[in-house]
Amino acid sequence: MSKDSKPARIETPQAIRGTQDIFGAPAEAFVRVVETFERVRKLYRFRRVEMPVFEKTTVFSRSLGETTDVVSKEMYSFEDRGGESLTLRPEFTAGLARAYITNGWQQYAPVKLATHGPLFRYERPQKGRYRQFHQIDAEIIGAAEPTVDVELLCMADQLLKELGIADGVTLTLNTLGDGESREAWRAALIEYFRAVRAELSEDSQERLEKNPLRILDSKDPRDKVFVADAPMIDDFLSAQAQDFFAAVTSGLDAAGVAWQRNAALVRGLDYYRHTAFEFVTDRLGAQGTVLGGGRYDGLMESLGGAPTPAVGWAAGVERLAMLVADGGGVAEAPLDVVIAVEDDTLINLAIKASATLRRAGLSADMVASGSPRKRFDKAAKIPASVLLGMSLRDGVVTFNYRGADVAAVQALLDPLKA
RNA sequence: GCGACUGUAGCUCAGUUGGUUAGAGCGCCGGUUUGUGGUACCGGAGGUCGAGGGUUCGAACCCCUUCAGUCGCCCCA
């Protein structure tokens, strides 16, 4: 096309902020995470669920609490043509709870569920945080026993080990107690921090009103001074709550799952009870949590269902994939055979050879473009077990094999020359 | 929403106190070695220096605005 007849240049649309196009080694790491999750989840007999990526907004707003920042600013909500407010799912749990209720999954209770896929949050992107991101998710719904908390954590622990990233990751564990324990603790915390209010950071002064438990994991040194001596949940636990937590920790010990107590680990939402946990690392910058979850016995009621105990966790696939990639990574699988087509008259023969190899279960690719004399060198740069140069010499089709163990390939392809 | 840093070729990046026609490596295209060869050599295409405005005789470089990216804060279901 001449310069004169070139059409006016169209501006290429940009990708949406916070979305990613994953390709090559990072994509391999991504599927490694998902495939490992699928394998491990079957070992624990978690049942696969496929869920819609959007729900009525109320599914999330009721479960999260109408007034929180999370609901008001950080969800992708829109109206459909009928004027109904819909939201791209920002988490799995609420949708699974809705499905449990609307589909009558009580009949399967206690039921172990596993799913994975994209989630959407309207946030400023940074390392390990995207607007469209992906999680793997496991929930056990309809069981109140600490045994299932242990099983769920055990599965998470095995997953991280099988991904080969357990070394730099530690399980931090806490209990929020039952409803009364939690309320008593919360009241004590408010009283304690109110007394020193003026000396807290600006952010924490606001947290005192909106979300006092969050002061406990403030990063500001002005807050940390007081956090160290803040009331601990342990002083407010009922006997039953103590027993529950003891059963979880002793179960983890029995399963050989290492854990660390973190008395400052909290959840912002009111429906969380008892077990709360995060697997954390210092290798991902500010985003230290690799996998997190807890027991949410109060959630079902907030969606209009019968009181139903449940516990679950979710983990960011991108964050796990980054750890997998940092720890040696995952290369794209090398080819079995690469064919350099050094003469254009041999292209159909090469196509036939490729098809033969692939039908025999061998991966094959061919280099058939550009200067014929450079194709061999180009093919030689592609990692493959066998390199086959196809050329025409004095009118004779010549196959030249290089690499380790060419015999099997030769046996398949040499007959094609005739 | 706030802050810091960064935008130069398809990719990774140079580019001096502002001064001729903006460079390198890799990649891509073509050629040389008439060859059993992952090496080497020669040549070529490809850039409105993110965009817009300003200062200046002159801007990739200085100033303003804007867009985008990265990292952090807030938030973290």
Image (cartoon, grey):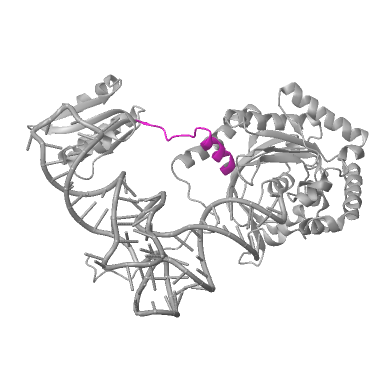
Q: Specify whether residue A251 is in view.
A: yes
Residue shown at 22% from the left, 67% from the top = A2
Residue A184: percent from left, percent from top: 92, 46
Q: Which residues are magenta?
A: A318-335
Left or right of B32 on screen, residue A224: right
In this rendered view, identify the residue nearer to me: A288 or A352: A288
Question: Is A409 or B75 nearer to us in this picture?
Answer: B75
Which corner quadrant holds the C terminus of chain A?
Answer: top left
Left/right placement of residue A288 relative to residue A235 reads left
Relative to A402, residue A101 above or below: below
Q: How many marks?
A: 0
Vertical relation: A26 (above or below) A197: above
Which picture quadrant has residue B47?
A: bottom left
Which quarter of the rendered picture does the N terminus of chain A lie within?
bottom left
Q: Position of residue B11 (x, y in %)?
A: 39, 50
Q: Which residue is found at the position 75% from the left and 32% from the top? A: A260
Q: Which quarter of the picture shows residue A378?
A: top left
List x then y, in percent, for residue A148.
76, 31
**Left or right of A264, for residue A383:** left
* Image quadrant assignment for residue A349: top left
Q: Is residue A396 magenta?
A: no
User: Residue at the spot x=82%, y=58% of the render?
Assistant: A205
Residue A33 in the image, given as x and y percentages of width and height: 55, 36
Task: From this view, report whether residue A120 is shown above or below residue A100.
Answer: below
Nearer to us in this view, A169 or A376: A169
Is A214 displayed left or right of A286 in the figure? Answer: right
